[in-house]
Image (cartoon, helix red, strand yellow):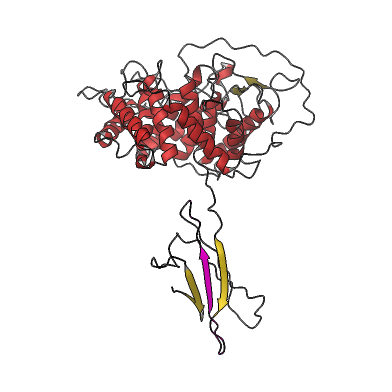
């Protein structure tokens, strides 16, 4: 996580790597089962890292505990009762500890997680995200979310701030509409803003008044020609408006946060800023595909958008953040969520962002299930693992095929025919179905178009729950269940 003080840039060493023949799409993406196995393996690693008090981690336990809970939430898809008894206990203990870190007094900082003078925006945003995955685990979750939302609204740099800030994104372009580390006034950055907005979005949405101001601030932080405060015009997101510290300009982390910020604020996909951001974000993922041996966060140091190339190669203006900043896995999360606000994931398409995210993360996972920390912005191994699982999610796995499908006529004569259709659903997982299409190409006298039926749950026959072996009949243009 970025400090207020700038850190000396890491000097790039020319490597003289030839670019000929390199392709960011030259990989075979993992399958859905591979993605889900990686998530399970990552959660199994987290199983071993819980402290005796229920927390996770050492240096940033609030953030690390929140990311661990998000990981369990990804694994159980928001229903902790589907976890094993041992994991349910871990989740409950972690939630109880996390809630104990929330301020509950009547001060202006009421509702924040952690000390009000430390990282309340980061911690509160992540804690709310974690609680959004942990419904039903603790009687205090609902009140914790309510108080946390109030705290994030009070931390927002604008009229809702405590103390109140009357500002506009034109006059006060450096900060109005974003988030600072804490309640200090007159400062915002994209990293804090991203976590603040995420906490609000996952617990009921970003309030309209905040979204309106935040759109203006996001415009001010994007490196695009229409932004008079920009120092570049490549479409990337920067840490702060007008910054000229190159590792903070058009970097991977902040571009992802810019995009999901636009998405949470309701900016449409056709917007020029959104389109430029998506292009830049995909360039970042392409750079990552070309540099799997390095696995470091990147930024772009040239005026205009540039296709992926290997940092350090002749003529390439992409640069690695270096060990001080890093943030590779933080950026995988922000890019996945940012592009995902506007583009549907497609694991089978190597040009799709999600196929790249899955490929990059699944191929890097350590034998113990963790992902390695990359610089300060990943926070820790637990942080890197939590960001990776949050970025991956659970991939949709098509149901297994049904077996024993038969079709036989039981009526003949007249103008209508009836056909028995029978099949056996798969035993595990307990769902399945068939698609039924009436072909008109073999019945030239029939004017009816093809009829399709969607898959049905196990044990049903097109709406009936009484059939062990689903059977259906087509009679005179309509489907009827029968047993």
Identify the residue at image location x=35%, y=26%.
124
Give the residue at the far top of this rendering: 8
Q: Magenta region: which residues?
A: 411-428
Q: Is residue 256 visible?
A: no
In screen coordinates, is 72 left or right of 328? left
Q: Is residue 319 magenta?
A: no
Identify the residue at image location x=51%, y=30%.
388
Q: Identify which residue, 30 or 252, lies in the foreground.
A: 30
Q: Position of residue 312 (x, y in %)?
A: 71, 18
Tell me the quadrant of the picture where the C terminus can be found. Answer: bottom left
Q: Is residue 73 visible?
A: yes
In screen coordinates, is 123 left or right of 229? left
Give the residue at the far bottom of this rendering: 414
Q: Main secondary structure of the magenta part?
A: loop
Q: Position of residue 157 (x, y in %)?
A: 37, 26
Instruction: Answer with the quarter of the image where residue 112 lies.
Output: top left
Q: Position of residue 482 (x, y in %)?
A: 44, 74
Q: Identify which residue, 252 or 240, lies in the foreground.
A: 252
Q: Position of residue 476 (x, y in %)?
A: 51, 81
């Amino acid at each position: 996580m970025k400090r207020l003080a700038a850190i000396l840039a890491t000097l790039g060493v020319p490597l003289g790597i030839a670019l000929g023949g390199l392709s960011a799409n030259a990989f075979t993406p993992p399958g859905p089962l591979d993605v889900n196995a990686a998530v399970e393996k990552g959660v199994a690693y987290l199983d071993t890292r819980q402290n005796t008090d229920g927390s996770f981690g050492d240096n940033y336990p609030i953030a690390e505990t929140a990311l661990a809970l998000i990981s369990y939430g990804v694994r159980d898809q928001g229903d902790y009762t589907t976890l094993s008894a041992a994991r349910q206990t871990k989740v409950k203990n972690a939630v109880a500890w996390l809630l104990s870190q929330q301020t509950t007094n009547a001060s202006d900082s009421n509702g924040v997680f952690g000390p009000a003078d430390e990282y309340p925006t980061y911690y509160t945003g992540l804690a709310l995200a974690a609680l959004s995955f942990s419904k039903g685990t603790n009687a205090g979750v609902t009140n914790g979310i309510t108080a946390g939302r109030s705290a994030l609204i009070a931390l927002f740099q604008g009229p809702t701030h405590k103390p109140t800030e009357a500002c506009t994104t034109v006059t006060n372009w450096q900060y109005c509409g974003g988030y600072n580390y804490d309640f200090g006034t007159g400062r915002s950055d994209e990293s804090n803003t991203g976590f603040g907005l995420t906490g609000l979005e996952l617990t009921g949405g970003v309030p309209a008044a905040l979204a309106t101001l935040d759109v203006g601030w996001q415009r001010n932080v994007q490196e695009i020609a229409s932004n008079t405060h920009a120092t570049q015009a490549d479409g990337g997101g920067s840490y702060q408006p007008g910054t000229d510290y190159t590792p903070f300009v058009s970097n991977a982390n902040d571009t992802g946060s810019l995009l999901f910020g636009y998405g949470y604020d309701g900016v449409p996909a056709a917007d020029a800023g959104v389109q430029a951001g998506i292009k830049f974000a995909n360039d970042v993922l392409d750079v990552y595909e070309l540099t799997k041996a390095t696995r470091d966060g990147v930024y772009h140091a040239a005026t205009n958008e540039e296709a992926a190339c290997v940092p350090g190669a002749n003529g390439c203006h992409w640069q690695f953040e270096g060990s001080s900043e890093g943030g590779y896995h933080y950026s995988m999360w922000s890019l996945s969520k940012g592009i995902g606000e506007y583009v549907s994931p497609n694991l089978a398409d190597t040009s799709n962002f999600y196929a790249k995210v899955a490929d990059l993360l699944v191929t890097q996972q350590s034998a113990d299930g963790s992902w390695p920390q990359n610089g300060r912005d990943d926070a820790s191994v637990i942080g890197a693992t939590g960001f990776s699982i949050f970025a991956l999610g659970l991939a949709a796995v098509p149901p297994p095929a049904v077996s024993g499908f038969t079709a036989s006529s039981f009526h003949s004569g007249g103008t209508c025919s009836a056909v028995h259709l029978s099949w056996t659903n798969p035993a595990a997982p307990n769902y399945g179905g068939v698609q039924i299409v009436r072909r008109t190409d073999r019945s030239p006298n029939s004017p009816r178009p093809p009829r399709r039926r969607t898959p049905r749950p196990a044990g049903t026959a097109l709406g009936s729950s009484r059939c062990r072996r689903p059977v259906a009949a087509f009679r005179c243009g309509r489907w009827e269940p029968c047993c």
